[in-house]
Amino acid sequence: MSQNILSWHRNIFDNISRQYADKRLPHAILLSQKMSECSFLLAKSIAQLLECSNPQSNENGILEACNECLSCKKVSEYNHLDIHYYFPIIKRKNKNCSDDYFQEWTDFLQQNHGIIEINSWIKFIDTANSQAIISAEDCDRIVNIAQESSYEGKYKIFIIWEMEKLFHAAAPKLLKIIEEPPANTLFIGITDNLDKVLDTIKSRMQIIHLPAPSPEESVATLTELFNIENADAQKLVFTYGNNLPRIVDDLHKDTIPILINDFFIKWMRLAFQMKAYDLLDLATEFNSYGRDIQKMMLLQCSQYLDAIWLVNHNIPTSLILNELDEKFVQDFKKFIADDTIPDITKIIDEAIKNIERNGDSKLIFFDISLKIGQIFKKKYFLIKG
Ligand SMILES: [Zn+2]
């Protein structure tokens, strides 16, 4: 039985497997992804290989986990004692570190087959307006556990999911242990936002950029892992712009998902028409989502604008635009001039920062909507004049 490696992870996995076989594995790697790359599953595959009691060469001479030994079983059930998971949490009275959320974490992983993203995790543990962090307590635990010996005598592995959410004041505690860990220790960090990972941490880890799956690979993953008919999987991949974690998250819900593409189109239309009352309603809707979701929505909207700018310059960009209605893009791109995008992006970035500072999201959103409307108006009159 061979190990299950997602096809778009194959090259990276094979490289790491070779390094492992040659005993030149780095002690800290940072998997950088945008959203749909499913890095967590790659981290898990690497951990499984390192803990497997009976790894075997595949037909290409690459070492893989056996998928049958006790260690492999424990890894797949998330209860291997030498694999330690750290992830963003919402601090509560009796919960201040990842271990306190371990039951929720494994339920979440099992429900989603390891295809996870931060916003669905936050919704899973908290429906209120909270921001999640990897806590200072977790940083202390990482340092302590790294200094103890491993339970099963093989590798000790720390999987740190969403490293950009590391509580900044506590991060310096980790520097020394990441730079010079004890033997047979591997840190695997995962981030959706490499720019937001502290430079001091980044410089101590080997950064690996993950490729995104092709739409066909996403369809295959959905049919294999979730027993979805091929035609249905194709429809989902198209509707969600090939974003696997978002598809998987919505598979479990009865409620209507927030379709950010629809939200974006509605927002831009109302802003262009400067419909203040409707924009106020939209601001109320925006305010009903958690802060992390609000930030994600704004970020995604800003990416749509970038993509439309590219289309305007005849630079191909498929992935994001698959999500947007073509007629809308054709009508809308006329109002996207070279100077429009930086102006709007600046406004959106500022709004994200204000939301992070716990500003009033409804007011922030309403305010930027009017500002964006004014930018469009200026451009529109220039064209007409
Ligand atoms: Zn095994």
Image (cartoon, helix red, strand yellow):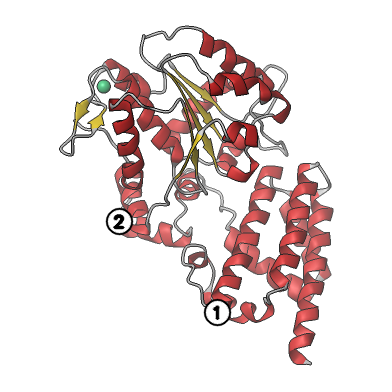
Image quadrant where residue 154 sits: top left
Answer above or below: position of 250 versus 138. below
Q: In which quarter of the image is the N terminus?
A: top left
Image quadrant where residue 47 sits: top left
Compute the Cα span from label 1 to label 2: 28 Å
Mark linked to residue 327: 1
Query: Three-letter amino acid code at disc 2?
Result: Asn
Answer above or below: position of 268 versus 257. below
Picture coordinates of residue 58, whole percent (x, y): 18, 34
- Residue bearing mark 2: 230
- Does residue 76 appear anywhere in the picture? no
Q: Which of marks 1 and 2 is nearer the N terminus?
A: 2
Picture coordinates of residue 86, whole percent (x, y): 55, 25
- Residue plotted at (70% across, 30% down): 168
Whether the residue under disc 2 has CB within 8 Å of ligand 1:
no
Picture coordinates of residue 127, whole percent (x, y): 66, 37
- Does residue 263 appear anywhere in the picture? yes
Q: Is residue 290 left or right of residue 100?
A: right
Local SS, label 1:
helix
Q: Quadrant of ligand 1?
A: top left
Q: Is residue 294 left or right of residue 44?
A: right
